[in-house]
Amino acid sequence: MLKYDKSDDELVECHEFATDAEAHIAEAWLKQEGIDCYLFNEIFSSLYPVGVAPFGGIRLMVRKRDLEKANDIINQLNFSGQ
């Protein structure tokens, strides 16, 4: 019997972006590839100048099981990121 590992569903940070444009492009690519992803700090980052947001940049979160594939896709997009 296969055992389901709940930790694979845990959200982990895949990448942090300084701009919302890059974050939304990455999000769209990941979703197109069937990877569920979520953006955090999007509103706070838009209120502060780049690099000054008290909570960091826009964080792209994915399921732990998708992290490696998501990182490969992000790296292919060749964003500057943080």
Image: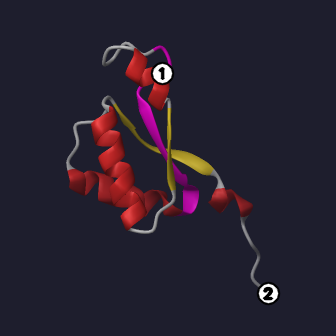
- The structure residue drawn at horizontal position 75% and vertical position 82%, both measured from the top left corner, is 2
Mark nearer the N terminus (2 vs 1): 2
> Which residue appears farthest toward the right when viewing the image?
1
- The structure residue drawn at horizontal position 69% and vertical position 57%, both measured from the top left corner, is 7
What residue sits right under mark 2 in the picture?
1
> Is 63 rendered above or below residue 5?
above
Tell me where the magenta segment starts and ends, as one range: 54-65
Amino acid at circle 2: Met
> Which residue appears farthest toward the bottom when viewing the image?
1
Total of numbered circles in the picture?
A: 2
Q: CA distance from mark 2 to mark 1?
A: 45 Å
Image coordinates for residue 21, horizontal then vertical, percent: 28, 38
Are the two marked residues, 2 and 1, in contact with CB atoms closer than 8 angstroms?
A: no
Q: Is residue 81 found left or right of 65 in the rendered image?
A: left
Question: Please, what secondary structure does the residue beneath circle 1 have?
Answer: helix
Amino acid at circle 1: Phe
Question: Please, what secondary structure does the residue beneath circle 2 have?
Answer: loop
What residue sits right under mark 1 in the picture?
44
Q: Visible in this render: residue 2?
A: yes
Q: Visible in this render: residue 56?
A: no
- The structure residue drawn at horizontal position 79% and vertical position 87%, both measured from the top left corner, is 1
- The structure residue drawn at horizontal position 48% and vertical position 21%, both measured from the top left corner, is 44
Q: Quadrant of the C terminus?
A: top left
Image coordinates for residue 80, horizontal then vertical, percent: 22, 37
In which image quadrant can residue 4 be found? bottom right
Q: Is residue 72 found left or right of 44 in the rendered image?
A: left
